[in-house]
Image (cartoon, rainbow, N blue to C red):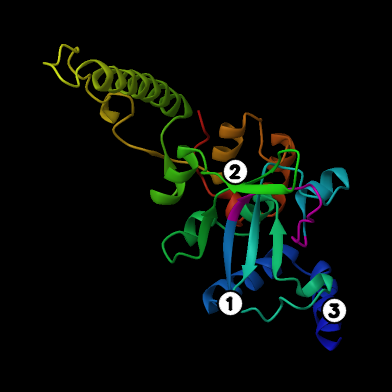
């Protein structure tokens, strides 16, 4: 179709000029117009391709597939591309998290609400039809979205989670015992334990962090897209001035 040829020509021309600037302009235009929204989501399969004109993973390994646990989806909101099966006009355009950060700053998209998170979809096979269920992101990721790109340390979330789980279990056991033993007589159960206070487990202030670093931390990998820091440093030096070169502290 004519639209397919136009899209192909645009991408081919961009590869000979400035692919990062071209991607940045294209994505920002779609977000500002309201025709698309950027969605962080779990990667349900390893078949999706990164749409960055300069895909860092492909540059390093030759592999364009998104094999990470998380990806960005530039999701079409207009429905105009929903029925077009061509590669360039599909309703969803996927990006490595690192590639998207290299193009622009996801943190800058929080205030205008051009970016959102979508609970990961897990496909389950219980000896029958495939069933999908949606889960929440790690609290550290949720905080990044809710507090302008700032989070606590991963160890603080872990300590709080363990303390809350212990309290919740003890509280549930006490309530069950109370219902079974004290139904028709005076309660002899021990006093209810107080819910743990978050102030006792978290620092006074959250720290600004790159989303890719937050995701790597909660996933337990050194880098969310498994890219060496030496390679990323070289890329930043070669393309200074883009989003990934902004000074943001590393996750502890």
Crowd rating for badge 3 (residues with CA inside 10 Å; few <14, some 14–19, many 20+): few
Q: Nearer the viewer, residue 18 or 251?
A: 251
Instruction: Determine which residue is flagged by label 3.
Output: 9
Q: Quadrant of the N terminus?
A: bottom right
Q: CA distance from mark 1 to mark 2?
A: 25 Å
Residue 72 image offset from top left, x and y in percent:
64, 55
Picture quadrant where residue 76 is located: bottom right
Sooner in the amino-acid sequence: mark 2 or mark 3 = 3
Residue at the image point whose x is 83% and y is 50% from the top: 58
Q: Is residue 186 above or below residue 210?
A: above
Instruction: Determine which residue is flagged by label 1.
Output: 35
Residue 214 image offset from top left, x and y in percent:
54, 38
Sooner in the amino-acid sequence: mark 1 or mark 3 = 3
Q: Nearer the viewer, residue 242 or 160?
A: 160
Question: Which region is colored magenta?
Answer: 40-53
Label 2 SS:
helix
Is residue 59 visible to the viewer in this orientation of the structure?
Answer: yes
Residue at the image point whose x is 86% and y is 47% from the top: 63
Label 1 SS:
loop
Residue 107 image offset from top left, x and y in percent:
49, 54
Specify whether 79 is left or right of 206. right
Looking at the magenta stretch, what is its main secondary structure?
Answer: loop
Picture quadrant where residue 201 is located: top left
Q: Are marks 1 and 3 in contact (CB under 8 Å)?
A: no
Residue at the image point whose x is 51% and y is 58% from the top: 116
């Amino acid at each position: 179709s004519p639209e397919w040829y136009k899209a192909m020509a645009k991408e081919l021309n961009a590869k000979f000029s400035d692919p990062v600037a071209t991607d940045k302009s294209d994505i920002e235009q779609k977000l500002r117009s309201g025709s698309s929204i950027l969605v962080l989501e779990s990667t349900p399969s390893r078949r999706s391709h990164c749409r960055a004109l300069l895909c860092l993973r492909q540059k390093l390994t030759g592999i364009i597939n998104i094999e990470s646990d998380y990806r960005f989806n530039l999701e079409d909101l207009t429905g105009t591309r929903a029925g077009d099966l061509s590669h360039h006009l599909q309703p969803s355009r996927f990006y490595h998290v690192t590639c998207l950060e290299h193009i622009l700053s996801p943190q800058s998209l929080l205030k205008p609400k051009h970016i959102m998170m979508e609970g990961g979809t897990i496909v389950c096979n219980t000896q029958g039809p495939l069933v999908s269920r949606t889960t929440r992101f790690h609290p550290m990721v949720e905080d990044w979205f809710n507090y302008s790109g700032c989070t606590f340390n991963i160890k603080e979330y872990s300590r709080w989670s363990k303390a809350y789980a212990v309290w919740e279990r003890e509280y549930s056991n006490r309530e069950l015992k109370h219902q079974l033993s004290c139904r028709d007589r005076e309660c002899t159960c021990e006093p209810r334990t107080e819910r743990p206070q978050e102030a006792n487990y978290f620092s006074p202030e959250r720290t600004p962090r790159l989303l890719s670093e937050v995701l790597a931390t909660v996933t337990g990998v050194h880098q969310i897209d498994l890219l060496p820091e030496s390679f990323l440093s070289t890329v930043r030096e070669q393309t200074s001035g883009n989003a990934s070169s902004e000074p943001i502290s590393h996750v502890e």
